[in-house]
Amino acid sequence: MSHLQYFTYKGFGERVQKDTHYSQAVRIGNIVKISGQCGWDRLTEEIPSDIGQQVDRVFDNVEHTLRQAGGSGWEQVYQIRLYAAPFDMEVTEHFIRNLRKYLPNHQPLLTGVGVAALYGGARLEVEVEAHLGE
């Protein structure tokens, strides 16, 4: 599988790679797919109780992971999968606020799914796919 390039980041990413045997992102040519990112602090693994802070960190973690895999950021994202526990207006409002901030010039595909629970008590988790261009 030499055509697959895997990426992870310091802190949480390195720990889960070692402990649970998965990576934070894979690059396949000009496509980057990112594992679900929650609102954790990448170094301390702390997840804030405030949902607005969680959503802000999710967007920062996605952007950081994209950059680790050779991307430039959210402007390259074409598909988002959002998992929320619960999927309510509070999560939705903060998520839309961040979409407008990080993606002011385009509207990627979005699938939102309500789930019973997420890792570490997180309220949301986001997976993305991005195209890095030619």
Image: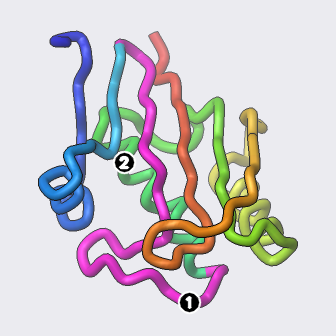
Report which quarter residue 92 is drawn in: bottom right
Question: What type is the residue that disc 1 sits on?
Answer: Ser
Residue 51 highlighted magenta (yes or no): yes
Residue under numbered circle 2? 65
Quadrant position of the N terminus in the picture: top left
Q: Is residue 90 above or below residue 4?
A: below
What span is in magenta?
29-52
- Residue 9 percent location from the top left of the image: 23, 54
| Residue drawn at (31%, 69%) of the image | 42
110 sits left or right of 129 in the view? right
User: What kind of element bears circle 1?
Assistant: loop
51 sits left or right of 118 in the view? right
The CA span between labels 1 and 2 is 23 Å
- Residue 97 percent location from the top left of the image: 76, 65
User: Which label belongs to residue 94?
Assistant: none
| Residue drawn at (56%, 90%) of the image | 49
Q: Is residue 85 above or below residue 101?
A: below
Quadrant position of the C terminus in the picture: top left
